[in-house]
Image (cartoon, helix red, strand yellow):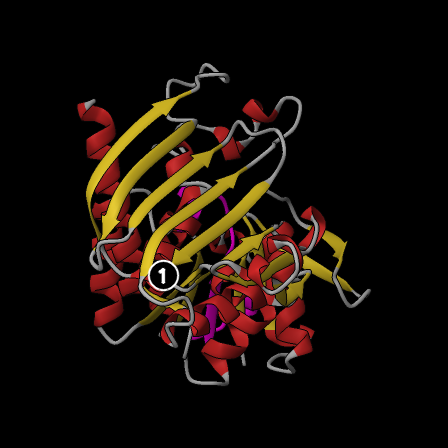
Amino acid sequence: MKVLLFGYGLIGKERYKALIELNISSEHDIDIVDPNKGQETIATPNLKNKTVVNKELNFIDQSRIKEHYDLIIISAPHIESRDLLFKYSHLSDLILIEKPMGLNVEDAIKIDKLSKRNKNIYVGLNYRFFPPIMKLKQDLIEEKFGKILSISMTIGLGHQENAEKSWRLDPKQIPYGSLIDPGIHILDLIKYLFGDINSIKSHSSGNVWNKNFFEDIVFIAKTTSDANLMVNISNVMWRSTFKIQVIGTSGYGIIEGRGRSYGKQIYKTGLKWGWSQNTTQRESEIIVSESDCENSFTDELKDILIEGNKIAATSKDGLNAMKLLDDIDKTLKST
C-alpha cells in the first residue's frame, strides 16, 4: 500500500511500525509529513533511517507526492489533525485519524458526512483493542454477570512538570478539557460496551493549570438497561489511572491498568459471594486476561486493512462519542 503518514511523534511511530510489521507497506511506500518538524532524518522503529519531509505537502518536492494514496494516517495534535483531514482527504478514500474526531460535534458531523461520500474514515480509539477490554466485551455479550446493576469507570492522566506548556493541555487543542482528552476513550467505551445512556448529571472541579477549562469531571447517568453509571475523567490525578468495574446480579468484572509504560492491564472476574466457597472473596476471583497492550495500534490497523473492520471505530462511532461529549458538556455548563 502507498501510505501518507501525517505526524511522526509517539503515535505516528507506532503506526509506521505497524505498517511494516503487518507487511502492508515497505518503508519506500510510506511518505511521512510531520507538521512540527523540519526536514530531517530520524530513526524509525525498524532501526533504519527515514526522511521526514518538510512541514506541509506544499513544501514537499513534487516528485514525492503520489496522485493518490491507498491510505492516509493522521497522527498530529488535535487541531492539526482536523485541519489536515479536511485539506488532504481528496488524496485517499481510506483515512485513519487519531482520536478525537474533530474538536466538537460540528467537526464530527462534517467528517461523518465526508465519510459517507465514498470515503472510509476510521478513528484511532485503540482501547477497543486492549485484550482485557475485548474479553470484557465478550463477557457482556454472553451476560456472564447477569443483569448489570452498576458500572464505574475512571481514566486519569498524571502529566509531568511544565505539562501546562504542552499542546496536550492547550485549551485550543482540548476545548472541553479532560472530557475530550483523555475522556474521549471512556466516552467511546461507554457506547461500545454498554450502549446509550441518559439522565446525565455532571460536576467539574480543578483549575490547577489555570487554563479555565474542565480538569476533573465526574458524571453519573443511567444506561438504557437502567444500570447506574458513574464516571471520573481527570487531567489532575498525578498517577496515570484506568479502571472499569461492572457489577451484575450474579457476579462482577474489574479491569485495572492502562498497559504499555503504565503497567499491565488486568481483567479479573468474581462471583457473587465467592467467599462462600471456603475462601476469601479476593482469592475467589479469576484473572481472565493480563496484557501490556503493546499491540493495540497494530491490531487496530490489522482490523481495518486485513480483517474487514470488526472492531475499529468508524466515523459514526466517532460522531456518537462527540455527541455524548456534547451532552455531558451541556450539563456541566448548566450546573
* Residue 67 seen anywhere in this rendered image of the structure: no
Q: Is residue 246 above or below residue 72?
A: above
Q: Is residue 12 above or below residue 68?
A: above
Of residues 78 and 179, which is closer to you in this image?
179
Magenta segment boundaries in residue numbering: 62-81
Of residues 288 and 194, which is closer to you in this image?
288
Report if residue 73 lies within the magenta region: yes
Of residues 331 and 284, which is closer to you in this image?
284
Q: Position of residue 73 (x, y in %)?
A: 49, 63
Secondary structure category for the residue under label 1: loop
* Residue 278 seen anywhere in this rendered image of the structure: yes
- Give the residue pinned by disc 1: 249
Instruction: Spot the residue most to the right.
Output: 47
Report if residue 125 lies within the magenta region: no
Residue 247 picture quarter: bottom left
Q: Where, quadrant-wise, is the C terminus in this rendering?
A: top left
Q: Amino acid at mark 1?
A: Thr
Query: Which residue: 25% across, 28% down?
Result: 332
Q: Position of residue 294 (x, y in %)?
A: 67, 63
Tally of numbered discs: 1
Say whether residue 299 is left or right of residue 314. Answer: right
Query: Which residue: 48% across, 85% down?
Result: 307
Q: Where, quadrant-wise, is the N terminus in this rendering?
A: bottom right
Query: Which residue: 27% across, 53% down?
Result: 227
Query: Which residue: 46% across, 77% down?
Result: 304
Q: Position of residue 136 (x, y in %)?
A: 48, 66
